[in-house]
């Protein structure tokens, strides 16, 4: 959600419930359960090393990222993943699970 453009936010009141996730392998299991329940995974990640790390953990990311702008919808579950210590102006080519921070966000 960093660098989120304001036009991704609806023009009405929304509430977000944000839960930090400390273990990415548990997050992978959680995502797999949601997919089994019928949730659809879309991703907006453009960083190749992060995508590969998440896939290696078992998170079923589609082949290509969504090129659109996410619009908040009540009932959505978001998984936000970011580099723990991004290097401005440098492309990180290798990412380990401990290099990532993540949160589960429910749109209420």
Image (cartoon, rainbow, N blue to C red):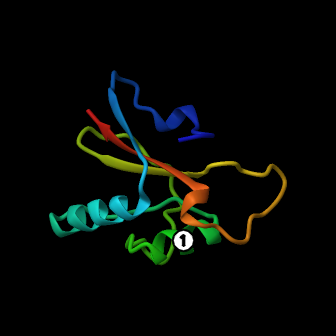
State the image quarter where residue 93 is shown: bottom right
- Where residue 103 appears, as percent x and y from the top left, is 43, 45
The residue located at (58%, 37%) in the rendering is 5
The residue located at (31%, 37%) in the rendering is 107
The residue lying toward the viewer, choosing from 69 and 82, is 82
The residue located at (48%, 38%) in the rendering is 8
Count the marks.
Answer: 1
Other-residue count near label 1 (Cα within 10 Å), few / some / many at <14 / 14–19 / ≥20: some
- Image height check: is 65 above or below 1? below
Q: Secondary structure at mark 1?
A: helix
- Image height check: is 86 above or below 10? below
The residue lying toward the viewer, choosing from 10 and 44, is 44
Task: Assign the C terminus to one quadrant of the image.
Answer: top left
- Where residue 73 appears, as percent x and y from the top left, is 31, 41
The residue located at (33%, 26%) in the rendering is 14
Would you say 45 lies left or right of 86 here? left
- Where residue 83 appears, as percent x and y from the top left, is 62, 53
Would you say 80 lies left or right of 13 here? right
State the image quarter where residue 34 is shown: bottom left
In this figure, which residue is indicated by the disc labeled 1? 53
- Where residue 24 appears, as percent x and y from the top left, is 43, 60
Residue sitting farthest toward the left: 37
């Amino acid at each position: 959600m960093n660098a989120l453009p304001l036009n991704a936010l609806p023009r009405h009141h929304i509430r977000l419930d944000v839960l930090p996730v400390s273990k990415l392998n548990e997050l992978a299991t959680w995502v797999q359960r949601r997919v089994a329940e019928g949730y659809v995974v879309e991703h907006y990640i453009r960083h190749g090393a992060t995508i590969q790390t998440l896939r290696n953990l078992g998170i079923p990311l589609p082949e290509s990222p969504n090129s659109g702008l996410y619009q908040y919808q009540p009932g959505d579950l978001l998984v936000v993943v970011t580099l723990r210590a991004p290097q401005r102006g440098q492309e990180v080519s290798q990412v380990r699970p401990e290099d990532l921070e993540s949160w589960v966000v429910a749109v209420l």
